[in-house]
C-alpha cells in the first residue's frame, strides 16, 4: 500500500471517531473548554430536570444575600451608604424577615412542587457535544432578554390597568416604596409563577443552546435583583450601558433606576424591567394621551 493511500486510510479512520470530529469542529469555540469540563464532570447533574430550578433559586439567594449584607453594613459604613437611593431609610430586620418569609413561602408552596413534578414527568435534558459560539451565547441571552422584557411589560401594564388584577395579584409587590433586594421576589404566587414560566420558555422558543438558557436565567435574575437592590453603584448596568438604554427611568422627577422610580410613584410608562424601548414607547403614548385630553 502506498504512503498516500495509507495516510488517507488513517485519516478516514480517525474522522470516523465522533470525539475526534467534535474536537476539530470545536476548535475556535471560546466556550468549548468550559463546556467540556461541565460535560465530563457534571453530566448527570446538568441533565437532571431539577437543575435549572436549583440554579435559579441558588443564584437568587446568592445575589440577595450579597445585597442584604450591604444593607446591614450601610448604616455604619458611609462608603456603602452613600450609594443607597434612600440613605436616610435603613433596611431593618423586620423588613428582611417579612420579605424573606414571603419568598420562602412561595418557594415551598409553588416552586418545590413544580420542581418535583418536572423531575417525575419530564425526561432528562439532552446535552449537545458542542458548546455555543460566543456570539450565539451573547445574542441568545440578549434575545431572551428582549422577549422577556416585552412579556413583562405587557403583563405589568395589564395588572396596573385592571384594578382587580392589581388588588388580587400585584399590590403585594408595591407594599414597599423603598426597594431593597428581597423585594425582588416579594410577590404573589401567580406573579412568581408567570415570571418563572416566561424565563423558562423563552430560551426554548428561541431554540437556544442549554448553556445559553442557563446563562440567561442567571443574568435575568441578576438584572432583576440589581434593579430592586436600592443601590446606585458605578458598575450598575444602567450606568454602564450608554444612551439610557438600560434601566434608566422615564420619570424626570427621580434620578433612580426604573424599578425604584416605579415603586416610589406610579408612572404609566415605567413598566419594563430593564430594556427601555417599551418604556419609551409607553412614554410617547402617555404624552400623546395627555395632549388629547
Image (cartoon, rainbow, N blue to C red):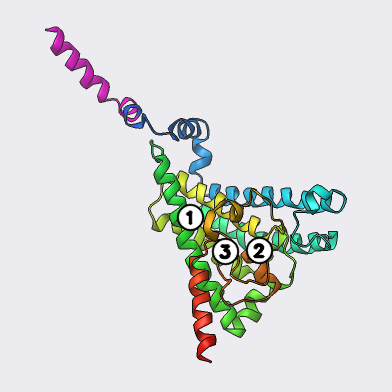
Residue designated by label 1: 121
* CA distance for labels 1 and 2: 19 Å
Tell which of 276 and 6 is nearer to you: 276
Q: Is residue 85 left or right of residue 40?
A: right
**x and y percentages locating residue 197 in the rendered image:** 51, 62
- Chain-order first, disc 3 or disc 2: 2
Tag of residue 109: 2
Magenta stretch: residue 126 in it? Answer: no
Tag of residue 273: 3
Q: Is residue 125 left or right of residue 90?
A: left
Near mark 2 (Cα within 10 A), the count class, few <14, some 14-19 or many ≥20, is few
- Chain-order first, disc 3 or disc 1: 1
In the image as oriented, which residue stretches furthest toward the right? 76
Q: Is residue 88 left or right of residue 140?
A: right
- Chain-order first, disc 1 or disc 2: 2
* CA distance for labels 3 and 2: 25 Å
Residue 255 visible in image: yes
In the image as oriented, which residue stretches furthest toward the bottom? 293
Which region is colored magenta?
1-22
Tell me the SS state at disc 1: helix
Residue at left 75%, top 63%?
99
Check whether the beta carbons of the residues at disc 3 and disc 1 lie within 8 A of each other.
no
Tell me the SS state at disc 2: helix
Amino acid at each position: 500500500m502506498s504512503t498516500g493511500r495509507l495516510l488517507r486510510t488513517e485519516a478516514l479512520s480517525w474522522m470516523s471517531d465522533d470525539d475526534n470530529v467534535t474536537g476539530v469542529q470545536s476548535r475556535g469555540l471560546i466556550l468549548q473548554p468550559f463546556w467540556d469540563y461541565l460535560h465530563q464532570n457534571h453530566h448527570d447533574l446538568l441533565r437532571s430536570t431539577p437543575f435549572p430550578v436549583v440554579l435559579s433559586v441558588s443564584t437568587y439567594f446568592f445575589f440577595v444575600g450579597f445585597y442584604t449584607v450591604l444593607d446591614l453594613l450601610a448604616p455604619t459604613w458611609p462608603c456603602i451608604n452613600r450609594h443607597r437611593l434612600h440613605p436616610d431609610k435603613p433596611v431593618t430586620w423586620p423588613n428582611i424577615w417579612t420579605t424573606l418569609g414571603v419568598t420562602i413561602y412561595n418557594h415551598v408552596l409553588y416552586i418545590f412542587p413544580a420542581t418535583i413534578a418536572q423531575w417525575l414527568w419530564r425526561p432528562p435534558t439532552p446535552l449537545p457535544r458542542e458548546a455555543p459560539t460566543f456570539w450565539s451565547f451573547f445574542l441568545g441571552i440578549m434575545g431572551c432578554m428582549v422577549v422577556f422584557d416585552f412579556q413583562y411589560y405587557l403583563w405589568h401594564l395589564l395588572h396596573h390597568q385592571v384594578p382587580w388584577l392589581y388588588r388580587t395579584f400585584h399590590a403585594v409587590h408595591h407594599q414597599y416604596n423603598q426597594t431593597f433586594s428581597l423585594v425582588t421576589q416579594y410577590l404573589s404566587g401567580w406573579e412568581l409563577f408567570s415570571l418563572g414560566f416566561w424565563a423558562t420558555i423563552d430560551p426554548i422558543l428561541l431554540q437556544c443552546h442549554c448553556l445559553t438558557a442557563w446563562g440567561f436565567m442567571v443574568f435575568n435574575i441578576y438584572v432583576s435583583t440589581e434593579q430592586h437592590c436600592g443601590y446606585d453603584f458605578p458598575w450598575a448596568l444602567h450606568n454602564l450601558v450608554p444612551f439610557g438604554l438600560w434601566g434608566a427611568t422615564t420619570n424626570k422627577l427621580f434620578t433612580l433606576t426604573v424599578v425604584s422610580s416605579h415603586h416610589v410613584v406610579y408612572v404609566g410608562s415605567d413598566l419594563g424591567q430593564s430594556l427601555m424601548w417599551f418604556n419609551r414607547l409607553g412614554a410617547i403614548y402617555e404624552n400623546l394621551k395627555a395632549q388629547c385630553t
